[in-house]
Amino acid sequence: MVDKFSIDTEKYRRALSTFFTGVTVLSTLQPNGTPRGLTVNSFASVSLDPPLVLVCVSKRASSYTVFANTTHFAVSVLAEKQKNIAKLFASKAIDKFSQIKWYACCSGSPVIQGAVANFDCQMYKFIDVGDHGVLIGQVLDFSHTGKAPLGYCQGMYVGFGLTNRVNSISKPPANTHTISEHPYGLVLINT
Ligand SMILES: Cc1cc2nc3c(=O)[nH]c(=O)nc-3n(C[C@H](O)[C@H](O)[C@H](O)COP(=O)(O)O)c2cc1C
């Protein structure tokens, strides 16, 4: 009999990576007033009334303690042209915000300029669970544009442009694919 708690971590990761997501930057102001953020694709809507969203932050993230203790945070949904920003915020760079354009949203949290959508949140509940913390935020304010969002699946960034446009910043292992219109539906083009 297979022990249900003994799973192959690599296979498990690969199975999870088949779930197609958008790419967001989770951000907050640190107690010293400086912005802090990381790339997350664990963003999800929890409730419409009240409006609640969640993100999961790994305890291995150097910003974990900051997010575990913050009262407010923001989520910026990245546009397909913002792959560089996704990569920057997935890095361990010391001052990520000095390399991009951002502004403070209503509650003071930093948001990424040019993002598809922004959600300004107040911490509703923080749950310490397993090797992650789950931040549930009550949405105080939001904005969105008609831009195409950046996608992520199986370790690759994916563009949603309905043309054969190539996202020029593609480098292995995070290759970019473009979804194009085809008589039979949408096709994923390896660019
Ligand atoms: C597409 C993508 C999605 C990610 N999603 C998450 C996530 O949901 N939660 C998380 O903790 N880390 C996630 N990461 C990893 C963090 O962005 C990465 O560990 C980052 O370096 C953490 O930054 P920090 O150490 O400055 O806090 C993701 C990385 C990528 C490329």
Image (tube, rainbow, N blue to C red):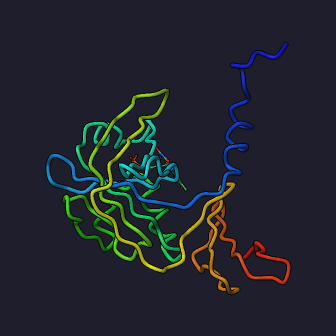
Q: Position of residue 69 (x, y in %)?
A: 25, 37
Q: Is residue 167 above or below residue 119?
A: below
Q: Is residue 7 above or below residue 136?
A: above
Give the image quarter of residue 6.
Answer: top right
Please identify the residue farthest to the top as the structure is shown.
1
In the displayed structure image, the side of residue 72 where residue 7 appears, left or right: right
The image shows residue 95, relative to residue 145, as above or below, that is above
Identify which residue, 124 or 84, lies in the foreground. Answer: 124
Which residue is rendered at x = 25% and y = 70% of the image? 103
Task: Give the image location of residue 49, x and y in percent.
Answer: 38, 50
Left or right: residue 184 versus residue 151 is right
Identify which residue, 165 or 182, lies in the foreground.
182
As drawn, which residue projects farthest toward the left?
32
Residue at 46% from the left image edge and 38% from the top image edge: 58
Quarter occupied by the C terminus: bottom right
How far across and how far down the image is residue 88, in percent? 44, 62
Relative to 84, say whether 108 is above or below.
above
- Please identify the quarter of the rendering in which residue 174 is found: bottom right
Q: Estimate the x, y position of residue 44 in percent, counting from the top left.
A: 50, 51
Judge by depth and name the residue closer to the eye, 164 or 106: 106
Q: Quadrant of the N terminus?
A: top right
Residue 43 shown left or right of residue 125 in the figure: right
How many marks do you count on the picture? 0
